[in-house]
Image (cartoon, rainbow, N blue to C red):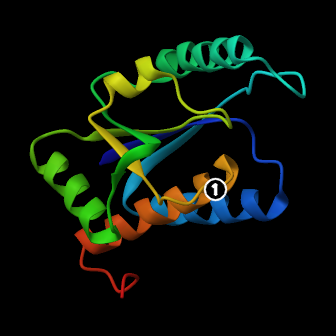
Amino acid sequence: MVNVTLICVGKLKEKYLRDGCAEYIKRLQTFCKINVIEIDEVRLPDNPSAAQISACIENEGKRITAKLPSGAHLITMCIEGKPLDSVELSQTIHKVGVSGVSSFAFVIGGSYGLCEKVKEQSHLRLSMSKMTFPHQFARMMLLEQIYRAFHIINNGKYHK
């Protein structure tokens, strides 16, 4: 069975997001073993300096790196990443799986972004859109897209 790890900076604060994510996690269990790891956000003052933001991103990056599963195909969510549609994402997951990789790790950084060292380790830098979304909302969107990808791979009816 495929292992999917989702590493996210920050906890889900809104009930509707927790409920939505829980639903997609439940649905994904048909296709894979799913594990969501939350990394605590670094607290910054209201108007942080560039140095404080940089230190925050580096700190979060070290904690993300410590949680990355060994041998996983790493996909980082980045605004500068490559945009894929749902079919292209499913094809990517399928192609990697057929090559013998059975573990995927997706990473969503914090509100200030993702550490460059983490991005450099990734096999794919993925962008959801040119638009900006709250990283907590992005988690639910990503879980839905992973679920959709598995349905496409398995010729399910979910994707239309």
Quadrant housing the C terminus: bottom left
Q: Between 80 and 12, which is closer to the camera in this rendering?
A: 80
Q: Is residue 12 above or below residue 119?
A: below
> What residue lies at 83% left-to-right and 56% top-to-bottom?
14
Left or right relative to 16: residue 129: left
What's under tag 1, amino acid-wise?
Phe
User: Residue 73 appears in which quarter of the rendering?
Assistant: top left
| Secondary structure category for the residue under label 1 | loop
Residue 59 in percent (x, y) is at 63, 13
Left or right relative to 36: residue 103: left
Instruction: Please tell me how crowded label 1 is: few (under 14), some (14-19), or many (20+) other residues with Cα within 10 Å.
Output: some
> What residue lies at 53% left-to-right and 22% top-to-bottom?
64
Left or right relative to 150: residue 88: left
> What residue lies at 51% left-to-right and 58% top-to-bottom?
143
Residue 127 in percent (x, y) is at 42, 51
Residue lying at the far left of the rendered structure: 99
Q: Between 129 and 135, which is closer to the camera in this rendering?
A: 129
> What residue lies at 34% left-to-right and 23% top-to-bottom?
120
Residue on which the image places disc 1 = 133
Left or right relative to 96: residue 39: right
Q: Is residue 14 above or below residue 105?
A: below
Q: Is residue 154 above or below residue 5?
A: below
Q: Is residue 28 above or below residue 69?
A: below
Residue 33 in percent (x, y) is at 42, 47
User: Residue 4 appears in which quarter of the rendering?
Assistant: top left
